[in-house]
Amino acid sequence: METENKKIVSKEVFMTNKGFKKSEIIFISTLGFALGIRQMAMTMVMPFISIYSETLSYNTKFLAGVALGIFGLMQAIFQIPYGIWSDKKGNKLVMLIGLMQVIIGLGIAYFATNIYFLILARAMQGSGAVIAIGYSWIASTVDDEKRTNALSIIGVIIGVAASASFAFGPLIHRYISVKYMFLYSGLLITLAWIIILIFLKDNRNKKEINEIKVKKALNILIKDKNFIALNIIAFFNNFIMTAVFFAIPEYLEKITGVDGMWKVFMPAVIIAIVIMRITAKNSKNEQSINAIILSFIIISIGIVFYFNKNSFIAIFVGTVFFMVGYIEISTLAPSLGNFILKDSYRGIGNGFINSLQYVGSFMGAVVTAAIWAKSELLAFILIIIIAIAGAYISRKYINKEDFYEGEDIASLS
């Protein structure tokens, strides 16, 4: 009977969702554009970090891995405090401060001449942890019954921007060096900063949250099995992403050359975006969980193709599989996570999700770099194991019945 009631609620919510108001469309589009620019600017240099590090003084393979992964570690450290801060002071102020930290970090990267300054620059870029704030801002602005769709749209925009940067980065690198890519990325994010400053208003009802409320919210979230599982999934997905983007450029540099990487990344991204859009458009929460399970399986299959490191076809097919799985998970997981959260602690919850996600980014780069020096095959086997573990956790520890539309899981009452 309880399940039937959930299905009825889901149907009623779906029927009452008649589309976004004009103000909501403008808000979602503007914030999505700003976050998309930020994500594209930060991601387009990722395939070149390990290679670019070789041109800097004092570089080692391990330090190159640190330079790639430190961005994720700093994101992880700052996500939760920034989420709490945004709950207290408002989303707009905290987002503008975070983006300014990113801009400063890109400036340091432009002037870096040794690996240690690059690590410092990447750490500064990572300290501007604003993606969780973006999700919270959207979720607390649109009407409740349209929240999932709005978050899905933002996830698609950010996912497309990140994915497109993987494709366009190699094309851009044909004309400008990595050094100037940092500079132009800083200019792009400055544009996003101006857009947010001028065009967006924080309409959220700002309520001060005392330390007891924060602790109570954290206590609820860490006891929620679904929420913890989604955090682990985010960790695994980003671990795999940075691991792949440490390893594959090493192979593609020999097959296509640095400037020819677009021949693999661009088609892979286009295919992944098309599949992601179809999934996001036609899947409700329950189907999204199945899609995450399938995505991890697809990733594990794709990694197997990398065993043939001298084959362009094998690398291409493997990258298509990887991109499809990664983008699916990075789009669907935040939407499911926000289904659990309430407005009063949405910033805290999104901070948690993004923290584990970026810890995964750091660990993926550092662990892969450490293993890569001893055995490339072992590094890929580890990635496959993690992908299979992600599918297992998604299947075993997420209860689909808790995600029927209209059912609010976590509650402070």
Image (tube, rainbow, N blue to C red):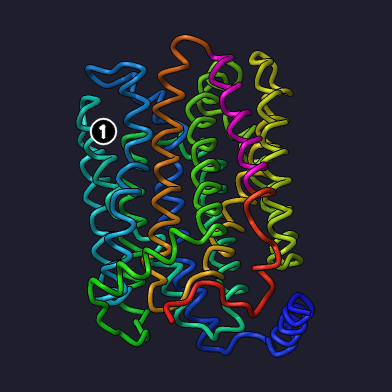
The residue where tag 1 is placed is: 119
Residue 392 inside the magenta-drawn segment: yes
Q: Residue at x 56, y 16 (%)?
A: 378
Q: Is residue 140 left or right of residue 186?
A: right
Q: Residue at x 59, y 22 (%)?
A: 380
Q: Amino acid at mark 1?
A: Ile
Q: Residue at x 40, y 25 (%)?
A: 50
Secondary element under disc 1, as helix, strand or loop, is: helix
Residue 95 inside the magenta-drawn segment: no
Give the magenta part as a residue range.
376-393
Q: Main secondary structure of the magenta part?
A: helix
Q: Position of residue 184 (x, y in %)?
A: 34, 48
Is the residue 288 above or below the residue 388 in the image? below
Closer to us: 359 or 174: 359
Q: Where does the C terminus fall, quadrant-wise?
A: bottom left
Residue occupying the far top of the picture: 374
Residue 387 visible? The answer is yes
Closer to us: 29 or 279: 279
Q: Where does the N terminus fall, quadrant-wise?
A: bottom right
Q: Position of residue 219 (x, y in %)?
A: 38, 64
Q: How many marks?
A: 1
Is the residue 233 above or below the residue 175 in the image? below
Closer to us: 102 or 175: 102
Crowd tier of the residue under label 1, counting other residues whose Cα lies within 10 Å: few below 14, some 14–19, many 20 or above = many
Q: Is residue 34 left or right of residue 92?
A: right
Q: Is residue 249 left or right of residue 390?
A: left
Is the residue 53 above or below the residue 20 in the image? above
**Res 358 quadrant in image:** top left
Q: Position of residue 126 (x, y in %)?
A: 31, 47
Q: Position of residue 346 (x, y in %)?
A: 42, 71
**Res 344 quadrant in image:** bottom left
Residue 174 visible? The answer is no
